[in-house]
Amino acid sequence: MMRFWLFAFALILASPAFAGVRVVVPNHDIARGQVIGESDMTYALINGQVMAGIASSLGDVVGLETRRTLRAGETLRLSDLRRPVLVAKGSTVTMVFEAPGVVLTASGRAMNEGGLGETVTIQNPVSYRQISGIVVGPGQVQAQAGGALNGPGNNRFAAIHR
């Protein structure tokens, strides 16, 4: 009889393990390109193990943009999301280069798109040289020192001077 009660007690303690894993799912269908808000998501319990890369916290997804249409109630992979695009491919951006005592700005054309903190390639419309820069805001890129991409011997500042 004691074995039965020990087994029953162990089963009660283990019951949360059988309840499932909590993951984040959309409340409703979310179109591609939309930024996810907290009210767009809810939690669901999934039986069994969850694959790597599945969103399990609202903090993982809120504020990100969808790469594809998300269906209500379906599990959400982190690869389905990205940072919102602040620099679009082909758009005109302001490049800023800062050195001690000097701030240079110039316009350039984005060769690829990027979100906050991502690296993009910018082409100077006058010299056609390309540099890399980090997206710091909508249409704004912080040029990286030594960012010229056209090979050795290029003046690293030539891409941002007019």
Image (cartoon, rainbow, N blue to C red):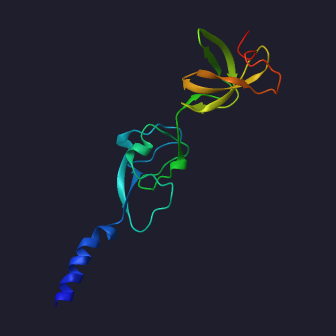
Residue positioned most to the bottom:
1
Residue 78 % position (x, y):
51, 49
Residue 22 on image: x %, y %: 36, 58
Against 69, is 157 above or below? Answer: above
Q: Residue at x 35, y 50 (%)?
A: 42
Q: Give 55 or 157, whichever is nearer the viewer.
A: 157
Q: Position of residue 26 (x, y in %)?
A: 41, 49
Left or right: 78 as drawn, with respect to 43 = right
- Left or right, 59 with reference to 123: left
Residue found 17% across the figure and 88% down from its top: 2
Q: Vertical placement of 8 versus 27: above or below?
A: below
* Among the 4 quarters of the image, the one containing residue 23: bottom left
Residue at image position (78%, 17%) is 155
Question: Looking at the image, which is closer to me, 64 or 127?
Answer: 127
Tell me: residue 157, above or below residue 135.
Answer: above
Give the percent coordinates (x, y) of residue 101: 59, 8
